[in-house]
Image: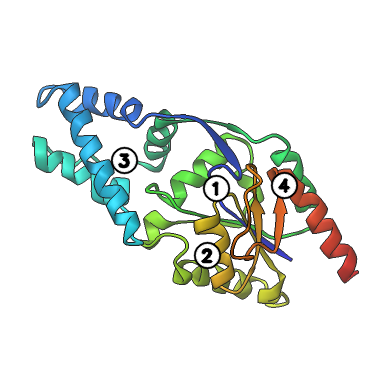
Amino acid sequence: MILIFDFFETLLNIKTMDFNCGLKPLWEKHYKDKCSLEDICEFGEELFVHFQNMHKEGKEFPFVKDELPLYAEKYGGEVVSMTTDEEADFLMLCNDMEHISGVKEMLDEFEKDRIPMYVLSNSGFTAKALWTILDRFGIGQYFSNVWSSADYGKIKPCREFFDMAIDAVLLEHPQERKEDILFIGDTYSTDVIGAHNAGIKAVWINRKKEEDTLKYATFQIVETNGLIDIVNSIRGTVL
């Protein structure tokens, strides 16, 4: 068995989201003498619309690689560079995150059972930044690898994005089969449909108890830690 998790609302919950909370310290450090805070926030909103349009096309808009240079182009000065920690800091300023109840204990149980675990996420922030955040919440050590659409350029449900991760995990675990992989996520349109189209089992975290209209979800749970029962059931059947 191999487990691949979505990131947001699957491993960590976002309590509040405000991109301007990240832009303000960026402005204070690099653009305060070039524009007003209101100006840069308005430009950030324009870029968010561009981000949304890119996603409609199935493409990612990486923050450090593609978005930061646009601020320098508009307001002048050198293109701002960010270390992995600085990128993680920015993302955490924009998103007030918290543990999802029971996730750490669940991951600990899976690790003890030697179940390989990975993360595949849609995000404008790099996999290294996402992994750093997982480390800060004390759960990064459970994962063998993290992939982000910011590095890949395309977003879930893109089949190629899933296939890349599937090929990588099966290369690391040649004793496992594609049929042994579970993808766990909360968003039907990206996680469930993407996993189904890639030919792997989908575990849908269906908190709102919505209808599985396409019948693509292999399993449904209300919260992430409900995965324990599914894993135990599958392993019990195999044993």
Query: Which structural element holds mark 3?
Result: loop
Query: Which structural element holds mark 1?
Result: loop
For this rendering, which residue is in front, 134 or 238?
A: 238
Taking 17 as reference, is 115 left or right?
A: right
Q: What residue is shown with label 1? A: 7
Instruction: Kindly check if marks 2 and 1 are in contact, taking CB atoms under 8 A apart as contact.
Output: no
Whichever of labels 1 and 4 marks the residue nearer the N terminus, that label is 1
Q: Is residue 126 above or below residue 152?
A: above
Whichever of labels 1 and 3 marks the residue nearer the N terminus, that label is 1
The image position of residue 80, as x and y in percent, is 22, 39
The image position of residue 121, as x and y in percent, is 49, 53
Which of the two marks, 2 or 1, is nearer to us in this view? 2
Tell me if I can see residue 186 in this picture.
yes
Which of the two marks, 2 or 3, is nearer to us in this view? 2
Q: What residue is shown with label 3? A: 82
Tell me if I can see residue 60 in this picture.
no
Q: Is residue 37 above or below residue 83?
A: above
Whichever of labels 2 and 1 marks the residue nearer the N terminus, that label is 1
Which image quarter is the C terminus in?
A: bottom right
For this rendering, which residue is in front, 61 or 52?
A: 52
Q: Is residue 170 above or below residue 225?
A: below
Disc assigned to residue 107: 4
10 Å neighbourhood of mark 4: few (<14), some, or many (≥20)?
A: many
Which image quarter is the N terminus in?
A: bottom right
